[in-house]
Image: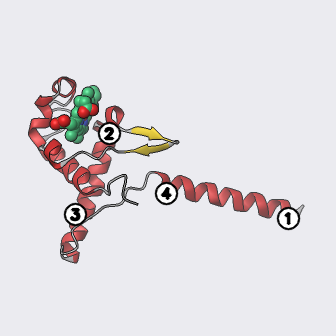
Amino acid sequence: MKFYFVVVGILLAVCFVQCVNQNKVTYDLPEAMLPHVKQEYLSRCEKGKILYDMNCAGCHNTKVKGKVVVPDFTPEQLKGYELRITNARHSETLTDTTVTEEELGIIMTFLNYKKKNDSK
Ligand code: HEC
C-alpha cells in the first residue's frame, strides 16, 4: 500500500514538472552581449512573450504533438510597424488600441531572440 502511494507521488511530480516546462521559451542572445544588457533583454523578451500570447498567439501558434510552437519569423518578416498593414488579417485586428507601438516593439524583441524551433 505504501509503495502505491510512492509511485503515484512520483508520477504526479513528473507531470507537474512537464507542465511547468511545456510553455518555457528559451532565448538565443548574442555571446558578446554584456551580462547586465542580457538581463535587460531577457526581461524584455519575457514581457514580449506575454504580449505575444495575448495578441498574436491565437492566430500564429501551432501545436505539434501537444506542444505549443511559436513560429520562427525571419528578421525581414519582423519589421515592426509594417506588420500592422501588410496583412489583411492584421489591419483589421492589430490596431493601435490592441497593441501600442511600444508593445509591438517588445513583441518583436521576443520573436527575434526566442530560440529557433529546429535548434535543440
Ligand atoms: C487575426 C489573426 C492574426 C493576429 C491576431 C495576428 N496575426 Fe500575424 N498574420 C496573420 C495572417 C493570416 C498572416 C499571413 C499568413 C502567414 O504568414 O501566416 C500573418 C502574418 C504575420 C507575419 C509575417 C509577415 C510577413 O511579412 O510575411 C508576422 C511576422 C506576424 N504575422 C506577426 C504577428 C504578430 C507579432 C502579431 C501580434 C502583435 C500578429 N501577427 C497577430 C494573422 C494574424
Q: Is mark 3 within 8 Å of ligand 1?
A: no
Q: CA distance from mark 3 to mark 4?
A: 21 Å
Q: Which residue is mark 4?
A: 21
Q: Quadrant of the C terminus?
A: bottom left
- Mark positioned earlier in the residue sequence (3 or 4): 4
The residue under the point 44% across, 44% down is: 68
Name, please, the residue furthest toward the right.
Answer: 1
Q: Looking at the rendered structure, which numbered label has been put on residue 41? A: 3
- Residue type, mark 1 in image: Phe
Q: Which residue is mark 1?
A: 3
- Residue type, mark 2 in image: Met
The part of the image, by quadrant, that contains residue 45 is bottom left
The front one of 74 and 60 is: 74
Query: Where does residue 49 sit, x and y in percent of width and height?
Result: 31, 50
Of tags 2 and 4, the one toward the viewer is 4
Label 2, secondary structure: give it: helix
Q: Which residue is mark 2?
A: 54
- Residue type, mark 4 in image: Asn
Tell me if label 2 and label 3 are in contact, CB under 8 Å: no
Q: CA distance from mark 3 to mark 1?
A: 47 Å
Classify residue 17 as left or right of residue 99. Answer: right
Q: Quadrant of the N terminus?
A: bottom right
- Mark positioned earlier in the residue sequence (2 or 3): 3
- Mark positioned earlier in the residue sequence (2 or 4): 4
- Residue type, mark 3 in image: Tyr
Q: Is residue 53 above or below residue 93?
A: below
Q: CA distance from mark 1 to mark 4?
A: 27 Å
Please tell me how crowded label 1 is: few (under 14), some (14-19), or many (20+) other residues with Cα within 10 Å. few
The residue under the point 25% across, 57% down is: 113
Please tell me how crowded label 2 is: few (under 14), some (14-19), or many (20+) other residues with Cα within 10 Å. few
Tell me if label 1 and label 4 are in contact, CB under 8 Å: no
The front one of 66 and 55 is: 66
